[in-house]
Image (spheres, grey):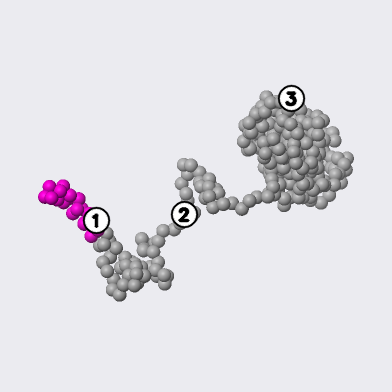
Amino acid sequence: MVAPPPARRGKTGSLSGRLQMDRVTMTSPETLPQFHLTAIDPRDPSVHDNGLLVVVVGREAGCELTLGGRSVSELHACLVRRRDGVWLYDLGSRNGTSVNGHKAHAQRLNDGDTVQFGSHRFRIRVSGQMGHAVTTLAASLHDAVAGRTEVLTRPVTVVGRREQSDLRLSGDDISRVHCLLVRCGLGLIVHDLDSRNGTFVTGRRQKEQLLTGNEILMIGPYEFRVHIGAEDEAGAASGPQARPEADDVWAAAAAETRFGSHPSDEGAPASPAGGASPATPDGSAGDADDFDSLIADALGESSPGPSAAEALDDLFADERDEADEGPEAEDRA
């Protein structure tokens, strides 16, 4: 989840600058596969795509398929019409989504599959021509006012005021669940969830719009310029990344340590087995006498002197003697 920026009121002003973008060839929605969800329980509603690219399932009134009951989440799942078929995406629902009895998070649906949202079961009918698998395009939103770029890494991004939103925006003009941003091979689909103040594309309020790059997307008082690129440009969508400085590397390493957690033995530096001393330059483990010999050789001494421990003991002994003699020596003087 992305932390919300400070709340804004009123118009944010125009965006400055022009982002580079790769245009994509648009495909008419009429040429995409169509689907119909038929409820197995006659008490549940059925739904057709009705020409929409995205159909949202959930308890929220703004969903195209609204289901009751505690087994269904506010925003449960969505179905997306793509050139390579109809795809199902679970939106982090509490009780999950399954296809033919198996849990599904992101899956292409086949004609005749049984799809279950919570305790509600449906059979899907898919018609129309389906193409080969397509590459999902990278997408990002650039906010010139805040001076930041949001790279959309999820296939579906939930935008809203609620805490669970993937892109959380604050302010009275933002609905709890405001809109969905869906990446696909055509570009970026923005799908409004019947938000109170609407979602605007280049100044016009839209229920759903396919964005192919460089449009102005307005969500409440927030204005974003949309950038679309190839899949391998997702990491570069926010601009060139500077080489990290040493302090940044250490800060990043420290940030990976969770407070209150205990580092695993696997990631910690291994200590010498059996308490062995550090290895000597020839690769063998040495002891204190070997270390003193090395120091002596480095200093050019022909014969080793007292060990380091003995030298330190003599030094502190001299200091102790001076401290003991201090007051008496002054009296004698």
Nearer-N-terminus badge (2/1) = 2
Q: Which residues are magenta?
A: 314-333
Which dot marks residue 268? 2
Circle 1 sits in a helix, a strand or a loop, which is it? helix
Q: Nearer the viewer, mark 2 or mark 1?
A: 1
Residue 219 appears in the picture as rendered: no
Examine the image and state in which quarter residue 308 appears: bottom left
Residue 266 placement, left or right of 45: left
Q: Is residue 331 magenta?
A: yes
Task: Please check the rendered image and state whether residue 203 is part of the magenta-colored stretch, yes or no.
Answer: no
The residue drawn where x is 76% and y is 28% is 198
Residue shown at 15%/48% (left/top)?
A: 330
Write down the quadrant of residue 217 in the picture. top right
How many numbered marks does the figure carry?
3
Q: Is residue 177 above or below residue 21?
A: above
Q: Which residue is mark 3?
A: 196
Q: Residue 168 occupies which quadrant of the picture?
A: top right
What amino acid type should be assigned to the residue bearing mark 1? Answer: Phe
Residue drawn at the location 28% of the way across and 71% of the way down:
304
**Secondary structure of the residue carrying numbered label 2:** loop
The front one of 303 and 251 is 303
**Label 1 or label 3, whichever comes before in sequence order:** 3
Q: Which residue is mark 1?
A: 316
Query: What secondary structure is the magenta-colored segment mainly?
Result: helix
Q: Are marks 1 and 3 in contact (CB under 8 Å)?
A: no
Above or below, 124 relative to 22? above
Circle 3 Cα neighbour tier, 10 Å, few/some/many (<14 / 14–19 / ≥20): some
Tell which circle, 3 or 2, labels the residue nearer the N-terminal end.
3
